[in-house]
């Protein structure tokens, strides 16, 4: 009887630690920061396939996208995780913005509704995250209500954070401004589009996931 219980207990702990060996890594940030571009680069680097579609139009990603069993290998170390690409967080989504981008009114209203639901779902998923990568457009002002709200939610949940200042290939990029806005976190400047500093980003993931 004791031996059977011991086996059961050992099996439980074995499965528990096995499950924890693969973390849930969420990509968060405002629309058009480059979350999906970076997710695609990771998936192509380590899985040989893309994560999802990329567009210059805001809220192209309106649903939670999950890529399972991503494994990064660097310097003899491995980091296994589920990659969760979330819709861009916005405090206000107006269908008229989509009309300005060229959509017809009916289509724009549907897009706005889907985008709003995507933001709500992304916030709900925060409770399931083990690690969050915040992807920001380094050409834009980091002191926005959206960014402060995201950071506040993560600090309240005590979730490890890595901040990516993306689009450093552009002339208006300002990594120092992003660093000044969030000095409590490591900020890594990259270009997800052309791959600049992506290796440094991978190293940052190993550090923050400890």
Image (cartoon, rainbow, N blue to C red):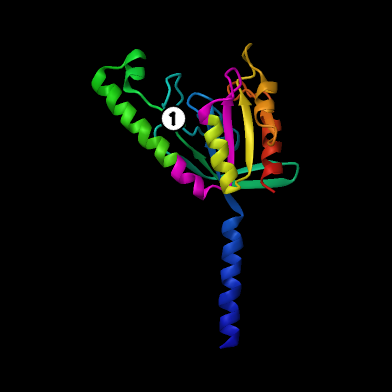
Residue 61 shows in this picture:
yes
The front one of 129 and 147 is 147
> In the figure, residue 75 lies in which quadrant?
top right
> In the figure, residue 135 lies in which quadrant?
top right
Mark 1: few, some, or many residues within 10 Å (few <14, many ≥20)? few
> In the figure, residue 2 lies in which quadrant?
bottom right
Q: Secondary structure at mark 1?
A: loop
Image height check: is 73 above or below 98?
A: below
* Residue positioned most to the bottom: 1
The front one of 83 and 105 is 105
Look at 64% across and 16% down and name the residue there: 173
Q: Which residues are magenta?
A: 123-146
The percent position of residue 158, horizontal first and vertical second, equals 61, 48
Q: Quadrant of the N terminus?
A: bottom right
The percent position of residue 123, horizontal first and vertical second, equals 46, 41
Look at 60% across and 85% down and name the residue there: 3
Look at 53% across and 36% down and name the residue there: 150
- 125 inside magenta stretch: yes
* Left or right for 113, reference 34: left
The percent position of residue 128, horizontal first and vertical second, equals 51, 50
Image height check: is 28 above or below 79?
A: above
* Left or right for 75, reference 12: right
Residue corresponding to mark 1: 91
Residue 48 shows in this picture:
no
């Amino acid at each position: 009887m004791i031996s059977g219980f011991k086996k059961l207990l050992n099996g439980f702990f074995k499965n528990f630690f096995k499950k924890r060996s693969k973390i849930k890594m969420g990509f968060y940030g405002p629309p058009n920061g480059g979350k999906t571009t970076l997710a695609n680069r990771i998936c192509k680097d380590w899985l040989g396939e893309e994560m999802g579609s990329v567009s210059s139009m805001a809220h192209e990603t309106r649903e939670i996208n999950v890529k399972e069993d991503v494994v990064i290998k660097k310097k003899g170390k491995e980091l296994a995780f589920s990659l969760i690409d979330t819709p861009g967080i916005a405090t206000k989504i107006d269908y008229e913005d989509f009309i300005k981008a060229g959509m017809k009114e009916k289509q724009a209203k549907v897009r706005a509704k889907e985008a709003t639901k995507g933001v709500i779902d992304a916030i709900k998923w925060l409770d399931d995250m083990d690690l969050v990568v915040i992807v920001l457009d380094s050409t834009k002002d980091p002191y926005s209500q959206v960014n402060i709200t995201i950071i506040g939610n993560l600090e309240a949940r005590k979730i490890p954070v890595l901040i990516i200042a993306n689009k450093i290939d552009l002339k208006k990029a300002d990594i120092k401004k992003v660093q000044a806005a969030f000095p409590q976190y490591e900020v890594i400047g990259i270009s997800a589009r052309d791959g600049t500093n992506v290796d440094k980003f991978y190293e940052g993931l190993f550090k923050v996931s400890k």
